[in-house]
Amino acid sequence: MRLRTKLQACHLTRPSSMNASQSLPEERQPYAKPQPWGMALDMVVPEVLTDDPLLWAPVGENMWSRPLHLNVSSGFYVHLLKVKRSGLLQRHRHSGMVHAYVIRGKWLYLEHDWVATEGSYVFEPPGETHTLVVPDDCQDMVTLFTVHGALMYVDPQGNATGYDDVFTRIEKYRAHFQAVGLGEDYVKRFMR
Ligand SMILES: [Fe+2]
């Protein structure tokens, strides 16, 4: 029952092979016990790179974000940032670590001399303060970001002017999904 519920939640269909599995060699047999009580539901998000505009919330000029995982119990979120033509993400300081994987295009920080190019992995430690720029010669950038904690928007001297965290992101995605007709509860499928 639990397995069926979970698969329905993920919009996946796969025939059960639990009975047939007993004749398989042990290394091919799935774990036969229930998952731990209280465990959060797993999640599969298909076609993460879809261009369906309903799934991408505008977050700035020429910039969109697609939520993949909004974690309210650990205070982090995973999203895809997409920039068409050049773009700039407002200067900010991170309270937690960030992992980034560049899927398409490239970007840089005004504060560093390196460029994150397609296929790159980037680790940003807590305290990092930077301004993300997609250069003019890049017309299509997509990067997967895992952001822990908060972004504090700052002026050039580091004075805080605002913030974003998983909760402000949830509010923005809720408003977007409501505005495009998917309903504000659509965001819940990404929340754990
Ligand atoms: Fe950042």
Image (cartoon, grey):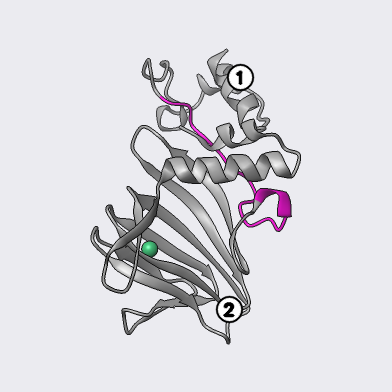
Direction from residue 176 to residue 40 in the image, left or right: left
Q: Earlier in the sequence, mark 1 or mark 2?
A: 1
Outermost residue toward the top in this view: 1
Q: Is residue 10 above or below residue 62?
A: above
Residue 42 in percent (x, y) is at 48, 31
In percent of the image, x 41 and y 32: which residue is there?
27
Given residues 17 and 160, the one toward you in this image is 160
Classified by dominant secondary structure, the portion drawn in magenta counts as loop
* Ligand 1 quadrant in view: bottom left
Q: Position of residue 145 (x, y in %)?
A: 44, 57
Magenta residues span: 40-55
Q: Specify whether residue 173 is painted magenta.
A: no
For badge 2, the amino acid type reads Ser
Q: Is residue 43 magenta?
A: yes
Identify the residue position indicated by label 1 in the image: 4
Q: Of 1 and 51, which appears nearest the observer? A: 51
Q: Which residue is mark 2?
A: 86
- Tell me if residue 117 can be seen: no
Farthest residue to the right: give it.
181
